[in-house]
Image (spheres, rainbow, N blue to C red):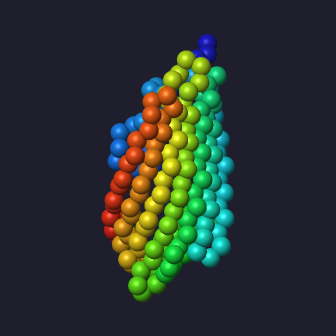
Amino acid sequence: MGSEMCIRDRFRARPTLHQLPLFVDTAMVAADHGELFACEAVWMSGATSLQFEHMWANVGSLDFQGAYVQLSHFLCGGERRFRRTFPRFVRVRPDEGGAWELAMRISRIDLDDRAVRGGEMTDYALGLNYYATANLRVMANLVYADLEDAGGSLLFGLRFGIDF
């Protein structure tokens, strides 16, 4: 006597400003199998960096995907660093006067497949970040979130980050 394993998962997303409510959401999806694939790349040269990520989820006979590309450039006083031994970005250590970073990002997520209508969203973000010290950052973001078949929203966010 055997039993079939059932996977239950939910896929959802907010625009680039993460304090907002969900804009796209599949609700719970059940299937007998699931797979998640992702690829990510980073290119860096001095004060400029380019990032890309694409994710694809297969749950039963359903396919969902999302991707982003981000370009970042430090106008003065810093650069992004990456640790290869444990792949991740490390803390920005600005010059004595601080560091200014300009970033642009395009994100797309598609949560519609067959009878599941989770939504499709593309958002465009422009950010200006000021790194006062290695532990203090101020981030300003202007985001246009475009929901397929529902229109768009222009959003602004200002955040302060302190860590130890």
Q: Position of residue 144 (x, y in %)?
A: 45, 47
152 to 106, vertically: above or below? above
The answer to whether residue 14 is left or right of residue 37 is: left
The answer to whether residue 8 is left or right of residue 156 is: right
Quadrant of the rendering where the N terminus is positioned: top right
Can residue 14 be seen? no
Residue drawn at point x = 41 percent, y = 80 percent:
98
Q: What is the residue that sits farthest to the top in this orientation?
A: 1
Q: Nearer the viewer, residue 87 or 1?
A: 87
Q: Quadrant of residue 49?
A: bottom right
Q: Position of residue 36 (x, y in %)?
A: 62, 38
Residue drawn at point x = 35 percent, y = 39 percent:
21
Q: Nearer the viewer, residue 96 or 154?
A: 154
Q: Quadrant of residue 161?
A: bottom left
Q: Nearer the viewer, residue 37 or 123?
A: 123
Can residue 160 be seen? yes
Q: Position of residue 51 (x, y in %)?
A: 61, 58
Q: Nearer the viewer, residue 29 or 118?
A: 118
Quadrant of the rendering where the C terminus is positioned: bottom left
Q: What is the residue that sits farthest to the bottom in this orientation?
A: 96
Picture mark count: 0
The answer to whether residue 135 is left or right of residue 62 is: left
Q: Quadrant of residue 50?
A: bottom right
Residue drawn at point x = 38 percent, y = 48 percent:
155
Q: Position of residue 102 (x, y in %)?
A: 50, 67
